[in-house]
Image (cartoon, helix red, strand yellow):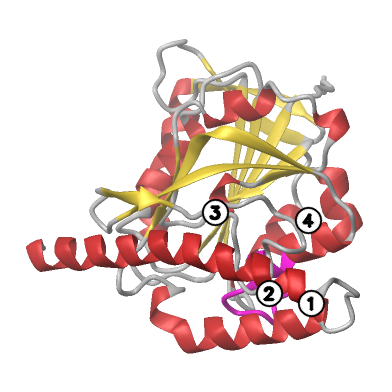
């Protein structure tokens, strides 16, 4: 018999050849503890490293240590032992697909279109959630806003803390010319995703930034959580750091798309941008400085 439940987190992880990191990502999702279900979808782009072996390992853990409960047409694994490390929630639907895609945003869109939860989020295969993140999100009164966000911690390839991401309130002014939200800290309602539509695969490095801009310019409401919710890994082969020219070009296109005819006060816009840039630059400079020190040690 199928059961209807209200509290389901739908999490999508896009993945491609990151077997060295994805184990930590998966564990950070499936080990979330609380009174909710987790609908977890991993969209792999056809990895040729050990990514699939890692994914299958966690799938087997769930099969061997859980019973199955049907919810909205999906099999959710329910732990037979309350102390089972990899299933501390009410139950987990663990699904994965490995096939060629058109890029990261395309993989995320495909994943979300399979999801059944009330709250959506995506986390890349080299990032991680903190252990109590879902509990913090689950306690919010989601009737009054569309998206939530918190603080993020930049970490090295080895997981060492660097510094906090330069998070600023997502307003039309603060989002001018830079992404002020740490992507894995952002959660949103399914109805918000249906309203805003798919992530735009055109923006190779800025599709998340474009989505926050789209949300703000569509008058979506954001809720700030004063807590560090996720870890964002920074290293030389990181997508953003290794494609700075594309990041800059994406930003220029986004500014033209959203701000050219926005009607916002240009003087005020640039004043806010000046102070926002000084704030984010300090954090970014610190992150790059620490990253260089860690790389020298490694």
- Mark seen at residue 182: 3
Residue matched to label 2: 270
Measure the C-alpha gap from mark 3 to mark 1: 26 Å
Give the answer, above or below, for where 105 lies relative to 233.
Answer: below
- The x, y position of residue 228, in whole percent, is 48, 37
Measure the C-alpha gap from mark 4 to mark 1: 38 Å
Q: Is residue 205 magenta?
A: yes
Tell me where residue 47 sits by quadrant.
bottom left
Element class at badge 1: helix
- Mark seen at residue 113: 4
Asked if marks 3 and 2 touch (Cβ < 8 Å), the reply is no
Left/right placement of residue 112 relative to residue 15 reads right
- The x, y position of residue 82, in whole percent, is 47, 10
Q: Earlier in the sequence, mark 2 or mark 4?
A: 4
Residue at the (68%, 35%) spot, across then down: 9
**Mark 2 closeness class: few <14, some 14–19, many ≥20 residues within 10 Å:** some
Asked if marks 2 and 1 touch (Cβ < 8 Å), the reply is yes
Measure the C-alpha gap from mark 4 to mark 3: 23 Å
The N terminus, quarter of image: top right
Q: Earlier in the sequence, mark 4 or mark 3?
A: 4
**Mark 3 closeness class: few <14, some 14–19, many ≥20 residues within 10 Å:** many
Residue matched to label 1: 266
Give the answer, above or below, for where 29 lies relative to 206.
Answer: above
């Amino acid at each position: 018999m199928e059961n209807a439940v209200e509290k389901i987190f739908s999490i999508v992880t896009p993945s491609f050849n990151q077997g060295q990191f994805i184990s930590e990502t998966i564990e950070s999702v499936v080990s979330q503890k609380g009174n909710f279900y987790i609908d977890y979808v991993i969209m792999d782009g056809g990895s040729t490293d050990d990514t699939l072996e890692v994914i299958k390992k966690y799938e087997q853990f769930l099969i061997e240590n859980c019973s199955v409960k049907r919810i909205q047409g999906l099999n959710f694994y329910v732990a037979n032992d309350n102390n089972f490390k990899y299933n501390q929630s009410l139950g987990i639907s663990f699904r994965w697909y490995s096939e060629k895609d058109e890029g990261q945003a395309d993989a995320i869109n495909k994943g979300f279109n399979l999801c059944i939860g009330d709250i959506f989020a995506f986390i890349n295969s080299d990032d991680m959630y903190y252990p109590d993140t879902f509990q913090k999100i689950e306690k919010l009164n989601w009737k009054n806003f569309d998206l939530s966000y918190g603080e993020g911690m930049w970490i090295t390839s080895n997981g060492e803390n660097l510094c906090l991401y330069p998070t600023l309130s997502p307003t039309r002014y603060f989002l001018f010319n830079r992404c002020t939200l740490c992507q894995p800290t952002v959660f949103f309602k399914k109805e918000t995703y249906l309203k805003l539509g798919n992530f735009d695969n055109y923006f190779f490095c800025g599709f998340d930034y474009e989505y926050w801009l789209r949300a703000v310019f569509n008058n979506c409401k954001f809720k700030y959580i004063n807590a560090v919710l996720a870890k964002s890994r920074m290293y030389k082969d990181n997508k953003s750091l290794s494609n700075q020219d594309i990041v800059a070009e994406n930003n220029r296109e986004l500014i033209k798309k959203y701000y050219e005819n926005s009607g916002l006060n240009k003087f005020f816009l640039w004043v806010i941008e000046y102070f926002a840039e000084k704030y984010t630059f300090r954090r970014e400079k610190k992150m790059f400085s620490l990253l260089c020190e860690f790389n020298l040690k490694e």
